Each structure stands twice: as C-alpha cells, then as structure tokens.
Amino acid sequence: MSTSVDDAIRTLLLLMPRLIGRAKRKPPPPELAGFNLAPRHLSLLAYLLFEGGLGVNELASRLEVAPATVSLMVGDLSRQGILLRREDEADRRRTIVSIAPEHHAAIDGWLGRGAAAWRAALSPLTPEQRRLFVDTLLAYERAAEDL
C-alpha cells in the first residue's frame, strides 16, 4: 500500500463504511433480543463488561456525557433487569452499577468479540503506535464534527 495521504484516505473511505455496517448488523444475542437496547447502551455495557462495577459519575466521565444521562440509561436498563445497582460499602452515598449475572455471558459474547478483534489489531503495535492510532481516530472524529 502506498503511504500518500490521498491513498490512505481512499483506503479509509472504503474501509470505514464496511466496519460501521458490520457493527450495525451485529444483532444482540437471542437472550437480549427482547430488551430495548439502543446504540447508546453499547458503550455503557462495554465499560461495565471490561471494568466491572462502576459508579454513575465514573461512567459519565468515561462516556463523556452528563451524570443525569447515565442515570437515565442505568435506570432504564435496571428496570429491564440487565443492570444491578448496589450501595458502595466504602461510601454509602455512592451507587455501583454492574451487569446482572444472568446477562453477563450474553453481553460478553456479544461485545467481547469486538474487543478481541481490537486486541488482535492493537497488540502487535508499540504503546506509541497504539496512542497514535487512537489519537488519529479522535482527531478524525473532531474534524468530522466540524463539517
């Protein structure tokens, strides 16, 4: 592959729609099909899957949204039985959110494959190369927002 900027753009213009299309076609597993899961829930579920239980403010910070937005999502998913809320033993004012054990395997099977693909793609890179890759995607996102 050529290394010119235009050649890289051509490749990415073909690749990005394929990646997005593949992600959109990945339906929830049958165990979760009856739930009202929207795309906005995927990042929240992914964080809880890979980080374990987190507080609402931690989730809001990681998702880059307001705590009220996370509270609404958590409330919705809790009512459906997908998430559990429990009091933090160390700070009773804080609520810890986690995936309900009966849905953990289904969510892991659904979202875990994407993480495995990212791991396979990123593992051969040096830490500096991984940082450059992530920074490049973030820069693209910012540039696309400005259009």
Image (cartoon, helix red, strand yellow):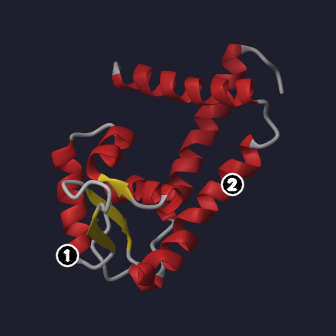
The circle drawn on residue 117 is: 2
Mark toward the viewer: 2 or 1: 1
- Residue 63 relative to residue 135: left or right: left
Where disc 1 sits, the SS reads helix
Closer-to-camera residue (47/7): 47
Q: Is residue 75 above or below residue 124?
A: below
Identity of the residue drawn at 44% across and 80% down:
101
Res 144 → quadrant: top left
Question: Amino acid under label 1?
Answer: Arg
Identity of the residue drawn at 52% across and 54% down:
21
Of callouts 2 and 1, the N-terminal one: 1
Q: Residues within 10 Å of mark 1 (few under 14, many from 20)?
A: few
Res 92 → quadrant: bottom left
Res 100 → quadrant: bottom left
Find residue 93 and report its horizontal and vertical position in percent: 18, 54
Find residue 91 and report its horizontal and vertical position in percent: 26, 54
Tag 1 residue: 79
- Residue 146 relative to residue 110: left or right: left
Question: Amino acid under label 2?
Answer: Ala
Q: Residues within 10 Å of mark 2 (few under 14, many from 20)?
A: few
Q: Is residue 108 above or below residue 32?
A: above
Find residue 18 and report its horizontal and vertical position in percent: 59, 49
Identity of the residue drawn at 34% across and 59% down:
41
Q: Quadrant of the C terminus?
A: top left
